[in-house]
Amino acid sequence: MQGLQDTPSDTHPMTVITRFAPSPTGYLHIGGARTALFNWLFSRHHGGKFLLRIEDTDRARSTEDAVGAIIDGLSWLGLDWDGEPVFQFARAKRHAEIAHTLLAEGRAYKCFATPEELEAMRADQRAAGLPQRYDGRWRDRDPSEAPANAPFVIRLKAETEGSTTVEDMVQGSVTVANEQLDDMVLLRADGTPTYMLSVVVDDHDMAITDVIRGDDHLTNTFRQVQLYRAAGWTTPRFAHIALIHGADGAKLSKRHGALGVDAYRDLGYLPEALRNYLLRLGWSHGDDEIVTTEQAIAWFGLEAVGRSPARFDFAKLDSVNAHYLKSADDERLVALIAPRIEASIGRFLTPVDTGRLLQGMAGLKTRAKTLVDLSQSARIYTTARPLAFDAKAQGVIAGASALWPDLLAELSALPEWNAAALEAGIRALAERRAMKLGDIAQPLRAALTGTTVSPPVFDVMAIFGREEALVRLQDAASAKA
């Protein structure tokens, strides 16, 4: 039977409803996050709905922690869903009901083949070099031929002639011969529904119009299309997205970045930056690298999704994140890095600390790639005296021992204490001593921060204020007196 799937429409006349359907057997991984993003953008672009379904039918591996991590990860990314999450396991009776309906209508049948018989069947197929698939041995037999009370599964009576075609919105038209599709199990011998049955019933009952998922599901789609048809239901449109690979082209692994979304948060990435980066993994809009959420919703379409695997590149992610850090609100950044700084210094930040961080944020955020970088560089404003000078700072301070008396005198006499006045005073001192400005600025930086790397030193001095800055310089002078 040619063309079993209804022809999809490019105009989307009905309300578009997409879904993200993760299995809570682990955290929300980066590939799942991109799938969720594409579904979210597609529905928002068309003014439709984005639903969340937790496919928790694997009771042995599904955990509440994983459910919480998925919901937390989506929320952190800003991917809000419509309505309450649907939990698949709670709908098992509905799934079984459909299997029994198909059985009653002659579109499914009872299979009494034992596990031993099925294994022998597969062994024979392997020996003959044939594809391993169910041979339909109970398809046309009367159940009365089975032993009394024998266990059975319910199988779909699949099409055996012609072909099944999927008009995929990413992959194009894809066809498989029906003879390659065996009669899949709908209901196991213990009465529990299979994944294939549950997914189709849930997508139908949730009125899903567009199924957007990884192309590793493409082979399942042909079977699911046949199940839709057997049930007499409208088939949704399908879009199968190429998977994410590492920068070296190999399948994505942890060393490439196959981490949970929570790990990216811990690594110091902003949600809007990760969202922007994931958007560009497989989707493009000209040469645009930075795409706001508003632009993404306005521009997103599956026609711009490539068929080849996208490559995950941490360097590009860092670059995107650095862009968003530069434009982020200073108060927000202070709030984000405060817990990281507190954990590293072993105390809560004081109002003075927070005030200095806020004043210094403009100079700090332009130099950082992640919140980890930012929190490390921002510690200069929260580290209490006496400072622990690093090795380079110690060397610089020791080499400037003859400079400290004049430097302290010059700074103490300044009538104003701001970056411009400080720079002017130090320039004047450098000229009198026939020195380069940097030869004085670097010892200043080391004395004030304990390190040789910081934002512009006169800004740092202004933020510390006259009293704190001078006492830090005195500490440095005394250390090498």
Image (cartoon, helix red, strand yellow):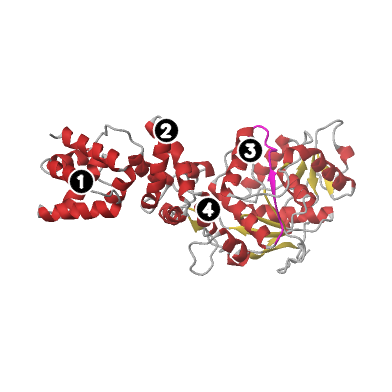
- 297 or 177, which lies in front? 297
Secondary structure of the residue carrying numbered label 1: loop
Would you name the residue on which mark 1 appears? 413
The amino acid at mark 3 is: Val
- Kindly indicate the quadrant of the structure image that contains residue 97: top right
What is the x, y in percent for residue 293?
57, 58
Q: Vertically, is 452 above or below 244?
A: above
Sequence-first disc among 1 and 3: 3
C-alpha span from label 1 to label 2:
38 Å
C-alpha span from label 4 to label 2:
25 Å
Sequence-first disc among 4 and 3: 3
| Disc 2 crowd, CA 10 A, few/some/many (<14, 14-19, 20+) | few
What is the x, y in percent for residue 289?
48, 63
Would you name the residue on which mark 4 appears? 272
Q: Measuring 78% from the left and 48% from the top, which residue is drawn there?
A: 201
Q: How many marks?
A: 4
Q: Measuring 14% from the left and 39% from the top, which residue is drawn there?
A: 398
C-alpha span from label 4 to label 3:
22 Å
- 277 or 453, which lies in front? 453
The amino acid at mark 1 is: Ala
Would you name the residue on which mark 2 appears? 343
Q: Which residue range is magenta in the image?
A: 47-61
The amino acid at mark 4 is: Glu
Q: Nearer the viewer, mark 1 or mark 3?
A: 1
Residue 445 vs residue 481: left or right? right
- 359 or 391, which lies in front? 359
The amino acid at mark 2 is: Ala
Residue 437 vs residue 44: left or right? left
